[in-house]
Image (spheres, rainbow, N blue to C red):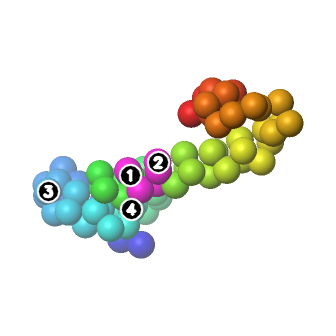
Amino acid sequence: MTSVSITDLKTKPASVILASEDYPVAIKSREKTKAYLVGRSLFEKMIAYIEDVEDVKAVEKADLSKATDFEEFAKELGI
């Protein structure tokens, strides 16, 4: 994983942001990681993945015997 100091982030933010597009960049202060910078496209992929996992869990947890059609089932799941 790429890591940069807070000073590097301040002096060249554009290059650090560019580096974060495909993989998180660790932001360090005194050799300790204080934060992670995640690019927009990677963040959106992470959110989509989390939402998909939550949807799968909701479907697995749902009582399918109660739903009469897909619309009712989707409403019960909040999707």
Residue type marked 2: Ile
Image: magenta residue range: 44-48
Q: Is residue 47 magenta?
A: yes
Instruction: Identify the image quadrant of the N terminus.
Output: bottom left
Marked residue nearer the N-terminal end (3 or 4): 3
Q: Please report whichever mark, 2 or 4, sits nearer to the chain's N-terminal start.
A: 4
Q: CA distance from mark 4 to mark 1?
A: 9 Å
- Which of the pair 22/35 is nearer the observer? 22
User: Type of residue at label 3?
Assistant: Ala
Q: Does residue 28 appear in this view?
A: no
Going by the numbered disc 1, the residue's amino acid type is: Phe
Mark 2 falls on what kind of element? helix
Identify the residue at horizontal 39%, vertical 62% (top origin).
Answer: 24
Give the main secondary structure, helix, strand or loop, of the magenta stretch.
helix
**Residue 18 on image: x %, y %:** 20, 63
Q: Secondary structure at mark 4?
A: loop
Q: Which residue is mark 2?
A: 47
Left or right: residue 32 versus residue 39 is right
Residue indicated by mark 1? 43
In the rendered image, the vertical position of residue 1 relative to residue 38, given as above or below:
below
CB contact under 8 Å: marks 2 and 3: no
Mark identifier at residue 24: 4
- Mark 1 → mark 3, Cα distance in angstroms: 17 Å
